Structures are given as C-alpha cells and as structure tokens.
Image (cartoon, grey):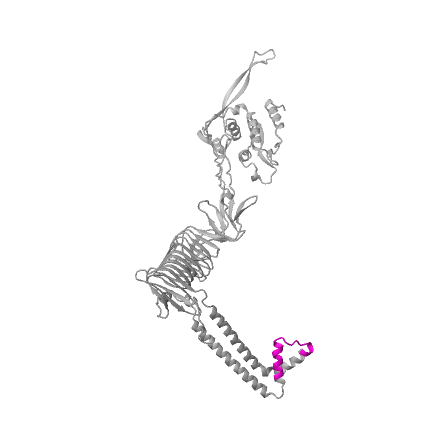
Amino acid sequence: MTSTADDDHLESSKSTLPAYVMVRPEGVFIKLSPPPAQDILILFIDRLFTNNELFAGLDYTCFQRLLFGDPTLSYYGNATEIKLARDIVHFLPQRKAVYKGVKISIRGDLAEYTFEPAFIERVTEEPIHGPAGEDGIAPVIDQVKKVETQPTKLDFDEFVADMWVKGVRFGIAVKTVREAIEKGTTGRMEIALQQEPTESTDAQIHEESEHLHRDNAPAILADGKADLRRTKNRFPQVTKNTPLLRKITRVLGKPGYKVTGVIIEPRVPLDIDLAKLAGEGTRIESSKDTEIIMAAMDGFLSLDDDTKQIMVMEKIENKSGISSQSTGDIKLDVEEYIEHGVMQEGRVIEGKHMTFHSDVFGTVISKGGNIELKSTLSGGRAQSSGGNITIKGRALNSTIETRNGQIKAEFADSCILIGKNVSIERAVNCTIVAETLQITMAEGCSIAGKNLHIKTANAHKNRETIISLVLPDLADFDQQIKAATSNRHNAKNTLEAKTQKLVASQSGPGLSNYLALATRIDAGEIQLNPAQELEWHKLIHKFAPLTQELHDLTEKAQAFEHEIARLTQARKTCGAGESCKIEKIAGDTIVRKLHSNRGMALLHNLPEHDLQVQLQQLGTVQERIFSGDSGSFEWHFEVTEPTTA
C-alpha cells in the first residue's frame, strides 16, 4: 500500500505535536498534569486548523473547556489526561470548498451562517485511445478530466475547523448546527453566541452578632408578657474579644468570551477597607481568608452616622433622644452616658455619670454619679444618690435631689431642691433644703439649712421668703443628760447595797478579800505566776455565782457614765458654725429656728407636699429671729450652758 502526499504530511504533523498532545489508537488525549496554558493551547489549535488539519470525532464541550474554561481544570478532578477527539485528520481542499463565509457581528457577540445544499466536485480522468494496432489494442494517447458535481453533507468537525479559521472560535451552538447538518436545513441561522461574564460579587460586611443593633421593642417578661417600661436592647453592649463585623472578600466574576474568542472581562467588584470602619475600642484580626473587626475592650457599641465607624466605648453617646417612640425606660450599666437629643416627659433613665445637651422633661436617676444638664429641666426630676447635679440652663417645676452631693443651678423656678451643698444664682418660688446654701437672689422661696448665705432675699407675688435654720434641740440634750445622770445614781446606789448585803451574808473575810483582789488584778496592779493563776481560778469558781450580779450592776453604771460623757460632748459641739447671713433684704423675709436633734434627716424623709407645707410655716414668736422687708441680717448659733447638771 502506497501513501499519498497528504497522508505523508499528516503523519509528519502528528510526529511534531507538542508534548501535552498524545495521539494513540484509542484517540487524541491532552495531558492535564500539568495542564497546558490556555494561550499556548490556542496557538497550537490555530496552527493545526490553519495547516488544513482537524479533529475527527471532536468533543466540542471538552474543546471549549480546555481553551476558554476554568484554567485550573477543576472540573476534571484528579484526572491526568482527557480525551479530546478520535483522531487528527487532513481537511481535504474539495471538502473545505463546501463551506461558505460566515457573518460575524461588529461587536463580535454573534455569528450567522447561511446553510444551503452542498455539492462537491468529483474529478475523474478518462483515457483517449488511438487507432488499434496490429494486435487489435487501441493505445491510450491522452486523458480527459471529467468533473462531476455530486450532492454532499456538511460535517460538524469540518465546520468547527473552518469556522475557526474564519474567526468563529467560541460558542458554537452544537445542537443547532448538528440538527441543521442532519436535516439539511437551509437559510441563515445564528450558529454562535458570545458568553457574558458572570456577575462579580462586591465585598460585603457580615454582622457576627444579632445583638449589634438597637432594639426598642418591649422586653418580654418570664411569663411572656411585654414590659412597656423596658426595651430589649436599647444600647448594645459587648465584651472584649467579641467578633463584631466580618469582611466577606469580594469575588471576581468568571470572564465571558465573544464568538471570536476575545475575552470579556467581568466587572471589577467593589472592595471595602475594613480599617476605615474600625473605630475606637476595636481592632482588626486578619487571616488568610477573612478580616474581622473585634471588640478590644468591654463596653457599649456605637455606630457613628458621620464616619460610618463602629466603636466600643466605656460611655454611651446617644443622639436620637428619648421619646415616647422609644419604648420603655432605660437602665444603664455604664460609667458615663451622654445624650444629645431631647428627653421627653414620662421617660425614666437610670445610670451613673450622665450628661444631657438638650432639654429634659423626664426623670434622670443617677446611682452615685454626677448629672449635668446643659439645657432646660422642665417638669422633670434629677436625682443622684451621692453625686453632684449641675444645671446650666433653666430648671422649671422640677425636683432636684442629691442629699449627699452638690447642686449647682443658674436659675430655678417653682422647683424643689434638696442637697448637701446647694448653689443657685437665682431661685424663684422654690423649696430648698441644704446643709450649706449659697444663693445670689432668692424670691418667695422656702429655705431650710444650717449654713446659709443669701446675697439678696425678696418676696415674689406677695409671697415672702421664709428661712428655717435647722438647729440642735439643746433642751432635748439636757433631758437626756438628766435622765442618764439619774440612772447612773440609781445604779451606783443599787450596786453599793448589793455589795454590803453579800459581804454581810458571808462568814469571814473571804468575799471582801476576793473583791479587793479582783479589783487590783483587773486594774493590772498585780501580776500572777502560774501557781497563783491556778489558785485565782479556784477563787473565781467559788465566788463567781455570788459576784455576777455585782459585775452586771458595775457595767450598767459604767454605761451610764459613758452616755453622760457622750451627750455632754455632743451638746458642746452641736450646731458648730451654723449661721445665716443675708446681705440685702429687698422684700418680706422671715428667719426662724427649727429645732431637731435629727438634723436634716427631719426634712429628708418628708413627702414633697408635706415638706413644702412644713417650710412655709412662719413659726411661733419665740422661734422667729428676724422678720422684715429691708436691711440685712446675720446670725450665728451659740451653745448655752445646760439648765440642769
């Protein structure tokens, strides 16, 4: 058997195939370990088809995957090679002529081909014979080529190779083309469409906890009922090392391809710089696959609307205010709270150190911290169990109370103020209770305290200013000292009578000696050695039942002695420094004494209405120490000598 020139060429081309292409009797295989680079593989295919060769029995899906699919070839798993075709064969010129031109759109997004009946020219040579010779055989003197046109069918493998050379390298609709070839369909048809790139995924932020956002819904009690005075999660709180936000890495979409094989790049996905979101009190933890914003401390979560940063802070800074639209009262377990919005009436907020920049119409309760109101307190209440309260705006129809702290106010109208130390620029129609009080202008106020300094006292709308100096009740001290002295005298008399009776009931000097010795031992005048200690314990055992009553009477008498000393000292020092000074009296003003050994506690426990009634009383004539509408007044408390010994 002889080989044609085309066959020789084909065999030669097969021998020069790249190392990753293997032709065996069972087919054409592509090595996948490692997979060939797609651009190199495209050059090989282009050279193969340009040299009028093609793949017979081509697996077009595999063909497209190798050239334009995932370059990692992950869809082939652990396979080391893949069968691409049955063989590599020559593309005969007469067969190549069967295929017509293809129309590719300007944008390269589609290709159209006009299918029509196909014919192939088959050329045969017929001999021309000369005259017959003597042997009767006519010799062949020439040959005549005879061209016959015969109908034929297109071939899909040839179609792929021809379209490649003509520019269609991607996206041939295999089913459409095969059906058109098989059925002999005629007419223009779309034979290839571009593949759009898949959509890229922008980087995203995933919240790592469902409790990062404020929840103003009513809290649910154990019995399933809603508590309208509390919210579920008004101010989110986190602990150190709590994951807050996780960055989900952006994902680039898969590229698309025009029918010409030109790549269509996917949209570049948006990225997120997590460092710009991590604010105060947070840190970023990075790993190979992700980034997470973590809480760097225990505290309260804050999302800043301006900077878009997430922060963890020891204090809470709120800008939305507290209104009827935010369900429930607020109880804060935080060192510092700052409110920029208005607090409406009916709302209650409890915390420690609290600052309010806008008007407050509700109730503010501090547990041992300071309260600062930079605007108006109207119809509300500010109360601290030990801190200070400062009102830089106006206080109207409100109650301000810090029994062990300081109150500072610019202006108070129709308010109740109770504090250890109170300082007010101007007070109108107020009820004020303070151990130490400084007022620049008091108008129609009811005031009680121990050390009072008022620059100007005046009436307000026919209502006088009434000042009650809370003074110790010396008569009460005198009665207590008198009673303790009488009790001490009675106890001593009883002790002496009992002692004489016991001594008289015993024969011999034993009890008298024991009592005298016990007195010296208790006083430390006698030190006993071990032998004497033993004898002494025997005497105690003998006389203890008889002397127990005497011991009890002695202790009782000594207790009365201590009580007398305590009361006497307390009387001498009570009311130290108590005074009242009014620099200018410009209207009806009354100063009276209010005696009580309970001190300010006399007024602290009174309901507000009862307190107001108590301090508006004018007192008896004996209790009043000033009454007038002009001049000035200064008075200091002095302790008088007791009326009884």
Depth check: 181 or 406 in front? 406
Asked whether, in this view, residue 192 is left or right of residue 533, the answer is: left
Depth check: 235 or 24 in front? 235
Q: Residue at the spot x=54%, y=84% of the render?
A: 497
Rendered view: 596 above or below 267? below
Q: Position of residue 52 (x, y in %)?
A: 55, 25
Rendered view: 132 above or below 201? above
Q: Residue at the spot x=46%, y=66% of the render?
A: 576
Position of the N terminus by quadrant = top right
Q: Position of residue 544 (x, y in %)?
A: 60, 81
Q: Quadrant of residue 531?
A: bottom right
Asked whether, in this view, residue 552 is left or right of residue 104, the answer is: right
Q: Position of residue 391 (x, y in %)?
A: 41, 55
Q: Which stretch is magenta?
A: 512-532
| Residue that sits furthest to the right in the current view | 531
Depth check: 547 or 311 in front? 547
Rendered view: 609 above or below 186? below
Q: Main secondary structure of the magenta part?
A: helix
Residue 378 visible in rendering: no
